[in-house]
Amino acid sequence: MSDEPREPGRDASAGDSRTAQFPASSYGGQQPYAPPGGSFFPPPPEQGTPTATTAMPAPARGRRGVGAVVAAALIAGLVGGGAGFAGAYALLDDRPGGTTLTSAPQSPNAVNAEPGTVTAAAQAVLPSTVDIRATMAQGAAEGSGVIITENGDILTNNHVVAGSRRITVTLQDGTRYPATVVGTAPSYDIAVIRLEGASGLTPAALGNSSSLQVGQPVVAIGSPRGLTGTVTAGIVSAQNRTVTVQDENGDLVVYNGLQTDAPINQGNSGGPLVNLDGQVVGINSAIETAGQSTGNIGLGFAIPIDQARRVAEEIMNTGTATKPVLGVQGSIAADTDDGAQIALVQPGSPAEAAGLREGDVITKVGDANVADFADLMARIGAHAPGERVTLTVNSGGADRTVEVTLGSQPDQSATTSPRGGSRTPFGGQSPFGNPFGGGN
């Protein structure tokens, strides 16, 4: 999945509402592999143009490819090492007496890591991180997930399992279980799957993403390129990032994301982003790439756990999730940084009840800035249905604040269609309403 971000050089700061765009070519695994002779990745963009991709499931055959490369490297290393050691032994033979190499005593922290360290965070969450392999109609794909109940409920990305015919989950100890989808929230790119016959598992501790600070250390865990149990570290680079991706149907998925420079690559999707207390604070979902490279460049995005927790609880309790409804429509084609201009207020919607009118420009949702209509979607989506939010609205050049109680509807699909030159958010239907209100 690739596309051009709006301003790749924009400074990453707290509350920055710039949009990271990720329209996709193979998001969700409908066609995770290229045909024979083809390429798994999308064609390279114009020279010097940054692109983005979801941290989507790595292809199953990618594991074998990586393994082959590693094996070749190990073989080459052994040959070179052998020659080097032969020379060393020859030199040692010229010296009187023998040579003995000793080891320092093992540090106790190597076994019991000091709390608040990357090592301790990894030790706490690795047992709760799983590898997910999904068989599709065409090929297979691989992603990650995190255990959230002892009986085998797994939180992951919707695009990891969308369109799957069979799901196999591997625990850190190598135990494998078949799994079924409990429910999905396409608008949030969240899914819950359940292991068959599992019990006594180690659920991860879920933290609080609202308390995160920019610059705070975090750890990403998952299966990048099929390398299970991989741990990387970085910081929270920014909050309130509007992340826009396309799903397997070409529909837009927009969410309010966390940005991190912890290295995330394809196959990390659905894995946990963890604070140094060993608590999950996000679900890794997307990365931005540049040029022909599809690997990590320090721009990763995760779904905040506060958002993911609410959605997962609804799925586990009812089988479906809900999304908030505002009831306005506008264009995402324009990028003016002046706010989200309302083109239509849906009759009977929460927006109409709050007195919003056509032509109004929404510049804030609560304390979060709104630069354009995609930002508005992300900010509204970060709230729960029924929640009361404060909007800052510019009407005729004058600012005012408006209190809105958000409506609710089932999250059954990400119904945004970006087809056509003049685009309205979600094609007149948004992940948070139709538009922001009504049925799908």
Image: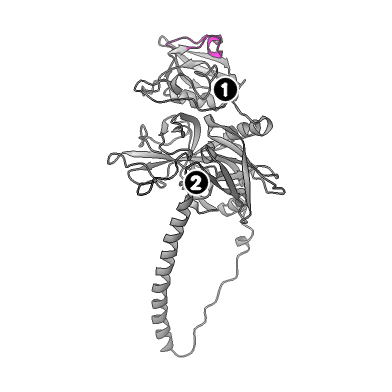
Dot 2 alpha-carbon crowd within 10 angstroms: few under 14, some 14 to 19, many 20 or more? many
Give residue 426's quadrant in the image. Answer: top left
Q: Residue placed farthest to the left in the image?
A: 47
For the residue pair 350 and 388, the one nearer the viewer reads as 350
Residue 274, can we see it?
A: no
* Three-letter code, disc 1: Pro
Q: Secondary structure at mark 1?
A: strand
User: Measured from the top left, where is residue 298 in percent x and y?
Assistant: 42, 45
Which dot marks residue 140? Answer: 2
Q: In the figure, 187 relative to 271: above or below?
A: above
User: Measured from the top left, where is residue 43 in percent x and y?
Assistant: 33, 42
In the image, taking residue 124 as reference, residue 399 lies left or right, namely: left
Q: Secondary structure at mark 2?
A: strand
Residue 350 belongs to the span the image colors magenta: yes
Which dot marks residue 324? Answer: 1
Residue at position x 54%, y 77% in the image:
102
The earlier-in-sequence mark between 1 and 2 is: 2
Q: Residue placed farthest to the right in the image?
A: 200
Q: In the figure, 247 relative to 146: above or below?
A: above
Range of the magenta residues?
Answer: 345-360
Q: Residue placed farthest to the bottom in the image?
A: 96
Give residue 319's quadrant in the image. Answer: top right
Which dot marks residue 250? Answer: none
User: Measured from the top left, where is residue 402 in percent x and y?
Assistant: 53, 14
Determine the CA span between mark 1 and mark 2. 33 Å
Q: Do tag 1 and tag 2 residues touch (Cβ < 8 Å)?
A: no
Residue 33 belongs to the span the image colors magenta: no
User: Measured from the top left, where is residue 112 in percent x and y?
Assistant: 64, 58
Residue 168, can we see it?
A: yes
Q: In the figure, 372 relative to 140: above or below?
A: above
